[in-house]
Amino acid sequence: MEDLVIRDADVVDGGGEPSYRADVVVDGGRIVSIVKEAAAAGCQRPRATRELDAEGLVLSPGFIDMHAHSDLALLRDPDHSAKAAQGVTLEVLGQDGLSYAPVDDRTLQEVRRAITGWNGYGDDIDFDWRSVGEYLDRLDRGVAVNAAYLIPQGTVRALVVGWEDRAATAQELDRMRQLVAEGLEQGAVGLSSGLTYTPGMYAPNAELTALCRVVASYGGYYCPHHRSYGAGALAAYAEMVELTRAADCALHLAHATMNFGVNEGRAPELLALLDEALDAGADISLDTYPYTPGSTTLAALLPSWAGEGGPEALLRRLADEETAERVRHDLEVTGADGCHGVPVEWETIEISGVADPALAEYVGRTVRESADARGETPWTTARRLLLRDRLGTAVLQHVGHEENVRAVMCHRVHTGGSDGILQGAKPHPRAYGTFPRYLGHYVRELGVLSLEECVARLTSRPAARLRLPDRGLVREGYRADLVLFDPATVAAGATYDRPRTLPTGIPYVLVDGRFVIDDGRRTDVLAGRSVRRTVT
């Protein structure tokens, strides 16, 4: 007999078509047969070792998180219910131009310090890899869900050029191209950038274009966190469209929205720009999370010149009174490039996590609230946190607009991404709630998307961007990465006050045909592996 038959499920197959009733049979990690309307037809029903009654439940492909920051969490936390309980069966890592491969010993330590606020410093991790392939091999030892990897352009630049604000030499550019090619050959699906983060933001467009040409030659895609989501947002989007057009490279826009007061109500302008490029033949997709606040590190808001030379150089500058005053002026008056060209509004910057437990009193308060309580300026508070926490402070930025969020999620090339930072005492609830929030709030409660269309945006559309021939649809022969949810009750449990609360209404999740969530409980199954780009 087969491993499993899921009986009488309402199948939403990921292709955007109307749902249908069926028995779905799984064996050997794949969907081996689909018997539509089996009960009504009176035909011989399939038998299996386990038979699961799915009456009242929707069966869909597992959700693909197109923008995840679980690079260390997958290794640190075998449970990983933050994603598994949402129905996520595949995450795309290596985001925003900074991650942990390819590196050497120096670069690894620098990157660990630079993104402590995203992933922790990693004292509990054995960093026994240096190349992209070795990192993917580490995932292949067994993790909670599957993972694909983007080569982080900022890490590549740190490895070859360092953290200096200068153009790469011809020899350095050749070396970066070689590293990108090697990473793609080892299984990466594309290249990411963080163009408001050092050192990736120091790269001129000619350098990025050269790297994107390598990506295009391997059939990968470019995923930039572009140069501004604030004052220069539309120009920054247009810049990425033109850059990838010149490189003939597919483009996937990371957490694509329009934030800060200067962009309220301006999502239609962004979508018109993308429609024009798409109609002209560009290969573009994007992802968003269904919330208004953003999340990053406190250090990321600083001007790029302050971070030149790396994390330790930044800390030295912050410790110097005169230099720190220049940083403050750029932040509060000019509008730092790290803060998207918009003068910082400290009342919108909420501390969500600290690396040093002694600083826990700051968590859950905005910088302005903590400053007012101490009778000091917000910059004094922020600077103290940056220095004492050694750049490990994570923040929420309450700068988004609901009308922009809804407009972008309705666009034809939209996919779902959590941008989930799992570090900190009070992380953004998107890390635990993105996918059930789409299904519960925006489908059932608001009707912004139909159920079938929403599922397609979370499954087959991202699988197509990743060029995965056997994932993202409920079809015979496809991988049995599946989720069963109750459309009447599915909802995000995570809130800003209780951000680690698990969702409701998702009782079963399978990775490679094995239950990672069974009757609402996390099993001990570690069926996840690296999902590598097929070399062509």
Image (tube, grey):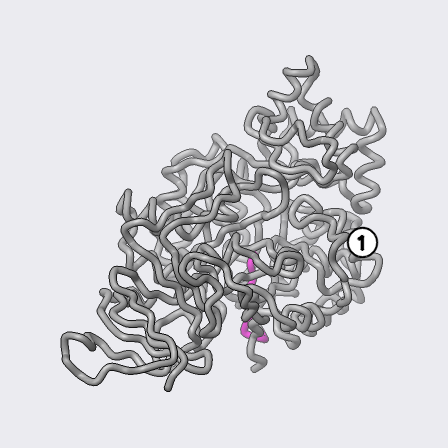
Q: Position of residue 314 (x, y in %)?
A: 79, 39
Q: With 271 as the anchor, is 124 left or right in this view?
A: right
Q: Position of residue 183 (x, y in %)?
A: 67, 71
Snapshot quadrant of residue 349: top right
Residue under the point 68% across and 59% down = 207
Q: Is residue 408 visible?
A: no
Considering the image in quadrants, where does the N terminus appear?
Answer: bottom left
Estimate how packed mark 1 is, as few (under 14), some (14 to 19) or many (20 or more) residues with alpha carbons within 10 Å: some
Q: With 101 as the anchor, is 30 left or right in this view?
A: left
- Which residues are the magenta region? 217-223
Is 112 included in the stretch rendered in magenta?
A: no
Q: Is 236 above or below relative to 90? A: above
Q: With 17 as the anchor, is 289 left or right in this view?
A: right
Which amino acid type is marked by label 1?
Gln
Q: Is residue 225 visible?
A: yes
Q: Which residue is under mark 1? A: 109
Snapshot quadrant of residue 161: bottom right
Q: Is 289 above or below relative to 508? A: above
